[in-house]
Structure formats: structure tokens, C-alpha cells
Image: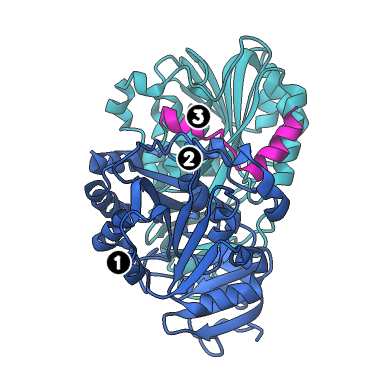
Chain colours: A cyan, B blue
Amino acid sequence: MEVNNGGAAGQPEGFSSVIPGWFSEISPMWPGEAHSLKVEKILFQGKSDYQNVIVFQSSTYGKVLVLDGVIQLTERDECAYQEMITHLPLCSISNPKKVLVIGGGDGGVLREVSRHASVEKIDICEIDKMVVDVAKEYFPSVAVGFEDPRVTLHIGDGVAFLKAVPEGTYDAVIVDSSDPIGPAQELFEKPFFQSVAKALRPGGVVCTQAESIWLHMHIIEDIVANCRQIFKGSVNYAWTTVPTYPSGVIGFMLCSTEGPPVDFKKPINPIDADDSHVKTKGPLKFYNSEIHSAAFCLPSFARKVIESKAN
Amino acid sequence: MEVNNGGAAGQPEGFSSVIPGWFSEISPMWPGEAHSLKVEKILFQGKSDYQNVIVFQSSTYGKVLVLDGVIQLTERDECAYQEMITHLPLCSISNPKKVLVIGGGDGGVLREVSRHASVEKIDICEIDKMVVDVAKEYFPSVAVGFEDPRVTLHIGDGVAFLKAVPEGTYDAVIVDSSDPIGPAQELFEKPFFQSVAKALRPGGVVCTQAESIWLHMHIIEDIVANCRQIFKGSVNYAWTTVPTYPSGVIGFMLCSTEGPPVDFKKPINPIDADDSHVKTKGPLKFYNSEIHSAAFCLPSFARKVIESKAN
């Protein structure tokens, strides 16, 4: 259907439009502000067991995936998020072999993990099959990640999946979640981080989506405090730019378990070193070793809060 | 007046509202997207000889200054822009004494320049007196920069002002301009950069507002190419996060003239070293030496374009 009215009438559920024909992202997570994209055409709308799912063609950001009214990815800027959430952890350890992705049902993180030739096994646990199906149909350049033969897809609850994982299984866990309102809520809580720590080998690493320094310092404070208690290796916060995420930035919590030390700020496994992945996946658009290290440099207002929690 | 309608009727000139009671930033400079802020109250609206000027109280970003429909600053995030555009150049040279600010009529850059104890003289040339007057009335924590006795305010055209400056006058020039549509257009053109280079001492530095890597790579390409021709010292591009600027980032072009070499990536005049400024101006909220160096690390897509122009 075409969007051509500005009110609630005729809008699909979960679709806010404040300009006729535009999609606006309004949420109590960022009160008083909204980013809007001009809609050319709504391509898909559905309601899964977990959330409202919408795909639309925007006029300047390519196709856009929206879950419960919140933009998850656009074709124009998804590279920043997917490349950073993946290569920040995987380039920080040598020779990652077993990787678990929680969430990430669009396949973009898988696409990035599969650039690493050392990786032998990639598990992904996504709660919502509709996200996977929609990604495969509308975002083939993202969902291409599912085509790697090393990938095993588990549809189910990430919290339950992790509890059943034998201790010390993974070299890296990547938590590509939505915001802590809705199905992803438990992925920001202490018991979940404890399961992650248990599932990692000594000196293994986790990278979780960790909100915006401009909007959510109170959430970040809690995450840092929890992680500092649970992860006995390194605990660091990084951030990057994603124009279509609220406030234009997104952060990542990077932690390692007790064991061989990990210095997240100095990538020891540079992806640029072996560029065989470029032939099949295309070049990296965003990530490089310089921006890896730079991502850990925080504005003073954020550094003050995060460092006080971390020590 | 209160904003309580969503259409054009009853809106002040230069004020777009796509949600009733919200201000939306719509421009051909960023087609197909718009950032909106909820308006509590419009505090000022006027039309100067150069542009429409609006000040409103937003519900979550404090007071907001809008010129020709484009957000120039909000109380909540102005620290990022003002601190970076000022300290990136001034911390890159030792002992800056004479500084010229072009634009910057809100006074925020002056506030930051005046943290530097070595500075003896600060000239500012702002074309629009209404911006200065409005800043002094509605943004006292920003316009406080005008109170420094080292400051001399010149109301007039920055291009003409620079042409009259004796060769080699300044250690640093900071160009705090709006976008290259409207009164700031000439500040992005080659003759202007030539005047800047002439006004600087050997090894002097300039920092200009240089748009968004996500939205304006074509403009940035041109600026870099021009600067590489004109400035025979260093030519570097840096960027930072500002949530209320389009795409959530803003860039800076940093150049030095022939003379003592300047390595912008390694600040040699750290502002943190002498914190006497904190007593009178308060602590820095955003800038620190780490984020200074990190600002020069570019995403791969931007690095590719900028480095190809720079060499």
C-alpha cells in the first residue's frame, strides 16, 4: 500500500507518520524528538508473535526495516552498525573459531562474521522467524549472511539458548538486539550477561548493542556496572555513527572473560590483513583498524560516567 | 506564541512543522529525511537582512536557535560542536595568540577560545547582528564568550573583512558558518580560502565547518581539493557527533599554511594541561585529547574519497 495520509487512519499498525507520506520514529526511549524518512512505498507489513514488522522503500535511504515502530536498518547506513558490532570483537582476538550471534535475524552480522576465514562455526539464535523471512525477501544484500555453510540458524529465545550452551563453547558472542523495550528486554539484564560469560571460553569476548551516549547514559551506567561484576577480563565501551539511529550514534559494550588478556583498543587480528573476503562479500564500507581504536575514545561527559562505573 | 497547529497557517516564516507542535528540519541539503523536536514555546522570531531567526524552547533539548529553518544549536548538544571546532585547531599549535572567528555570532566558539590563556586577541566577524543580539538574550551560557575583554566584535561580511586583514596576522582562523546555501555560500569557495591562507602566519591553522560525511561527500571532496591547492602545510578532515545536526555528525576541515609543520592528529597544546579556565568557564563537556586524535579516523567510504583528493 502507498502511504499518503498523515493521520492514524489508514496507517498500518506500528507506523507513525507525522508528515503525510513520511515515517516518523517516535518512542518514549527518546522523548521530544523524532527522525522521519520519506516513504515511497510500503513493501511489507506483518505482526509476528513478538512485534510489528514493516519494510518500506524510502526515497533516500533505500529499503528500511522497522520493528515495533523503530528503525532497525536502512540499506544506506547499515554498514556502520553491522561492521562495527562484528569486527570490534572479532578483530580483538586472534583466530576466532566459534561465534554465536544472539538476535541479528536480518543476517547482516552473519555476513560480517563470515569475512573471517578462521571461523569454523557460526550459530545464530533469533527469536522472530518473521525477521529472517522478511530479510531474505527484501534485503538480499544483508541476508546473504545466511548463505554461509558455517551458519546454523536456531529460531528461539536467546536467553534459553544460552543457558543450554556447554561452558566455554564460544570464542565470541555478538548480541545484536533491539532496544530494551519489547522482546529484547532480558538481553540487557544481569542473568543474561552471566549466561554469556559462561558460554565463552577463557579470554573469549562479547559485544552487545549498548544504546546512545547522548540519550541513554543511565542504561549504559547499569550495563557497565553489571559487566564489571561479571566479566573479569576487559570491560570497554565503544561507539559509532549511524545516521538513522536516534541521536545519530550507537554504542557497544565489549567485555572479555578471565583468561588470556584482551586489549579491545588495539586490534590484533586486522581484517584488512587478509582480503580474500572482499572477493565474495565486497569491500568493507565502514570499518578499518583506525576507526576500531578511535571508537573507544569517549566524549568527556560519557568518559566520566563510564570510567567511574568501570573502576 | 505557542505552536499548536501542524499546517502552514499560523506558523512563523521559516518554521516547518510536520507534527503539530513540533519543529521539523526540512531542506534540499538532506532530501527525504527530517529531524523534529517538540516545541514547548516559541521565544523569538524575526527576519534580519540575511535570514529568518527563530528561538524556541524544546521539550528535551533546551532552547534551540534556528536560522532559515536549520538548527544551529541546542543547549543540550552545543558543547560537541563548539568545543571541537575550537580546540581541534587551537590545541594543534603551541601558544596561539591571535585568533579570528568568522561567523559564530552565538558566541560559543568565543567561549571556547577564551579558555586558552595564551590568546591575547580574539576578533570575530559575524554578518548578522540579530544572531548576536538573540544569543545574548536567550543563550547566556553560549553568548558568555562575548564578555571576554580580549574579544572585538565586527559586524560585517567575513569575506570582505578577511581581504582587509594584513598578511600573516593570525595564528588561527575558525570559520563557524552555516550551510553553503544562504549567507554562508562564499565561505565554501576558493577565493575565501585564499584570503584565509593570506591572513594566517606561516604554520598558522584554519578550521572550518565542513558538513557531513554521510550526506555531503561531494561538497567535502571539493573543499578538500581546494584546500590541498591553497594550503601548503597539512590538510586533514575530522568529524564528530552532534545529534541535532543532519545525519548526526558534522565535519571540520583543518589546514595549515607553509611554515612550522602542524600534525593535527597529535595535539601539542593540550587544554587539559592548564585547567585554570575551568574555574570561570566550567569543565569541558565533550573535548579531550583522546577524542581530538580519534576525530581524524574516518570510515573507509570517506577515507577513500578524502585521501584520493588529498594526494
Residue B302 lies, in percent from the top left, at 35, 43
* Chain to which the residue tagged by mark 2 belongs: B
Residue contact between numbered discs 1 and 3, judged by CB atoms under 8 Å? no
Residue type (three-letter) at the residue carrying disc 2: Ser
Query: Could you say whether the residue bearing mark 3 is in a helix, strand or loop?
Result: helix
Q: Are marks 1 and 2 in contact (CB under 8 Å)?
A: no
Q: Residue A132: within the magenta? A: no
Q: Which residues are magenta?
A: A288-311
**Position above or below: A244 against B237:** below
Q: Which mark is residue A293?
A: 3
Magenta: main secondary structure equals helix
Q: CA distance from mark 3 to mark 2?
A: 26 Å
Chain letter of the residue carrying label 3: A
Residues indicated by labels 1 and 2 sit on the same polypeptide chain: yes
Closer-to-camera residue (A258/B147):
B147
Q: Are marks 3 and 2 on the same chain?
A: no
Question: Is residue A17 or residue A96 the one in the foreground?
Answer: A96
How far apart are the two marked residues, 1 and 3, measured between alpha carbons?
A: 42 Å
State which quarter of the image contains the N terminus of chain B.
Answer: bottom right
| Image position, residue A192 (x, y; %) | 72, 29
Q: Which residue is mark 2?
A: B94
How many marks do you count on the picture?
3
- Identity of the amino acid at label 1? Lys
Quadrant in which the C terminus of chain B appears: top left
Question: Label 1, on which residue?
Answer: B163
The type of residue carrying mark 3 is Ser
- Which element type, helix, strand or loop, lies under badge 2? loop
